[in-house]
Amino acid sequence: MTKPVPNSSRFVSLGLFTLLVSVPQTLLAQVAEGSAFRVDRINALVLVLVFSTAVLLYTKWAKAGKPLYLRKIPGLDAVEEAVGRATEMGRPVLFVPGIAELDEIETIAGISILGRVAKIVAQYDTPLTVPVRYPLVLAAGQEVVEQAYIEAGKRDSYDKDTVKYVAGEQFAFTANVNGYMMRERPATNIYMGAFFAESLLLAETGNAAGSIQIAGTARPEQLPFFIAACDYTLMGEELYAASAYLSHEPIMTGGLKGQDFVKVLIVLCIIIGAALVSFGYGEWFINLFEAV
Amino acid sequence: MEQMDRRWIYLMVAIAVIIPFIVPAELPISITPEAQAVFDSVEAIPDGSNVFVVFDYYPSTIAECEPMTTTALRHFFRKNCNVITLSNIPLGGPSMAETVTRRVAEEYGKVYGEDYVNLGYKYGYVAVMTGMGSSIESIFPTDNSGTPLSELPLMDSVKNYDDIAFIFEVADNATADYWVSIVNAQYGVPMICGTTAVGAPKYYAFVASGQFLGLLGGMKGAAEYEQLVGMPDEAVRGMGAQSLVHLLIIALVALGNIGYFIIRYKQRRERI
Amino acid sequence: MRTTVPVAIAFLSGLLLVTAFFFRADTFVGGLSQELTVWLTIVGGFTLLLGVVSIVRVNWTAIQRRKEGWGYKILTILAVFAMAIPSVLSPDWSPLFGRAEGSVYDWLFQNLQMPMMATMFATLAFYIASAAYRAFRARSAEATILLITATLVMLWRVPMGEYILDQLPGDIPAFLNTYVMGGFNMAVQRGIIIGAALGAASMSLRIILGIERTYMGKG
């Protein structure tokens, strides 16, 4: 399909605009040839600066006491209730912080939520089990859980083997956790982090064991499985928002608002870009977002 | 009907999987545009080009992924392409690449070191993918069995991505995202992706944006590719079992819903 | 001190890696970031020891206390060492050592680990069937649309199902490929991916700036 031909007045203004955008771009590209700085990545730098400014500004406003609205996330509201249920039943809580390494931001999100959950668990004196797949996650998990018990004033109740390394292989890990679920029948299973093919294996076994299940992952391909087999599922960015949400601290919600602001900007860019491309004027706009 | 013991379901699935292997049936396989695009893009590569076939899958997904790599190797060897295999999966990746490539190479009388090379595995896929952009030898000084690359004639003409005409990535995990964002976006090497049926929906976006020239999704995608290459094999044979299991699941869902509506109807009548 | 030092390290490391993205690899900043990545690999290697210690301690305690299934714990510990020890010994001493073909490690991997991994993955078929039967209910208009779409896509993805679809009026497979997979599915996937990427970036920023410290057990 050929592009529509723009009329003359539009053409002139478009030409001027293209000139304004393309000339500096060409100059920058020439400068970039011999420069240590990646001028061709300047678009990413602009985005980083806008994003950082938005997060910092909203955090500052939150600190100053400006009320920031956060919508309800039912899955997170259910955490305390689910831990309470485990206490009443005298059964443990299982927390799986995903199966990825600590360099995955999803795992860090999972570990952050673990800290919040561990504090609630410590307050209720409910047993907690956290199987992990990587030693670095083990070290971080142990630190977080110990600190949560200390903050809850239950240092003596803390068992170092609450967080335990199970296996480095995906399905060996899954087999172990599934075996644990069927033997110990935890009242509550919480899955927060990066999950892959084991998502349904874990969630379906937990369902068979009669546990209340709360899951959260940013992997779109695993979401349907969690939705089918769990009681509550956090989708995508909700996982990253969970720690801030559970903290009830304004300073943390500032970060979320900053993120929302950038999301609005991106949505606007998508709408403008789609409109420009649809009318045949989008080439320069697409070039602004070129990834190199 | 609404709540059936799950063990009955497991038994039915087992029977549905086994029957087609005992009583095989020839089923017509239609071709999706994404699989056709995979075939066409490989066909478009000049004969004798250097290509990457990447084994980025764990042994657990052999059923879905191995038919893709096997057919790709047959397709490339038929075109006399020089094949370089590698893996970003430490557990089983390099040995699967070794076994599958040797087996297919024997079918075509190809010689190791001249027609194909297995680079094996190196830790840190981001560093590996980025590093090969300047020098493959700096990342893989030796092949999978420890032979220096300088002793392999094929590698004389393959120094970095400039010498690679095509990447055939088969992955059951997110490494495909990195091949797109690092190698395709930054070095412009054309590529396609073969992935599991679960992973495929995510990659339609990459096909639409032109980053993947084509896409093979799960065993059905592999069967389509086998059909296109004209060498029906494991995936085509597996279509019988997959068909029956899909139909069984649909029947179970229908059954569950019938039970659900009967109960709902009864509850309403009781209230009246 | 226990909080300040890790937060400072996180800030400096994060800042360096973000800055390095905007510099060429052969510059000082680029080199430093690559060095940092190597450090991460080394630290990761050492922490493997932590994993071995944890797995032995947890299982050994269970054996000592004769907990239910303690016999399996002995097998676990034996399996850890049976795979690990021959694989780290030099193949010069014996062809059974190392990880090449014919070694103990390779034999165990090919004949035990690989079939076990494939078996675990294959059990997904059973679980998917059971989860679909239990969860797919036409409870509302949205759930009904989801149910019908899922059924059509499942039919479309297998030859027998496609044969059934071909008997119906209209080109349903083409509709599913163009509008369901290439339309609705792609739009939703993009939405989730963009949202999750922003969430990850926001969380990273909170970590680098020391606002988010819960991953260290603080805050």
Image: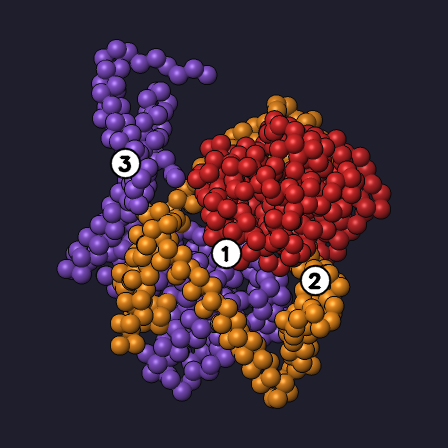
The amino acid type of the residue labelled 2 equals: Ala
Report, in whole angstroms, how far the alpha carbon at label 1 lies from the one at label 3: 32 Å
Q: Chain of mark 3?
A: A
Relative horizontal placement of residue C172, taking residue A16 as reference (left or right):
right
Res B272 visible = no
Q: Residue furthest top?
A: A8
Disc 3: which residue:
A31
Q: Are marks 3 and 2 in contact (CB under 8 Å)?
A: no
Q: Which chain is orange?
A: C
The amino acid type of the residue labelled 1 equals: Gly
Res A282 visible = yes
Badge nearest the viewer, 3 or 2: 3
What shade has chain A been given?
purple
Picture mark count: 3
Disc 1: which residue:
B124
Residue displayed at 76% across by 46% down: B103
Image x and y of residue C214, in percent = 34, 68
What shade has chain B been given?
red
Q: Chain of mark 1?
A: B
Residue displayed at 46% across by 55% down: A217
SS category of the residue bearing label 1: loop
Q: Which mark is residue A64?
A: none
Would you place residue A51 above or below residue B92 in this image? above
Residue displayed at 69% across by 31% down: B79
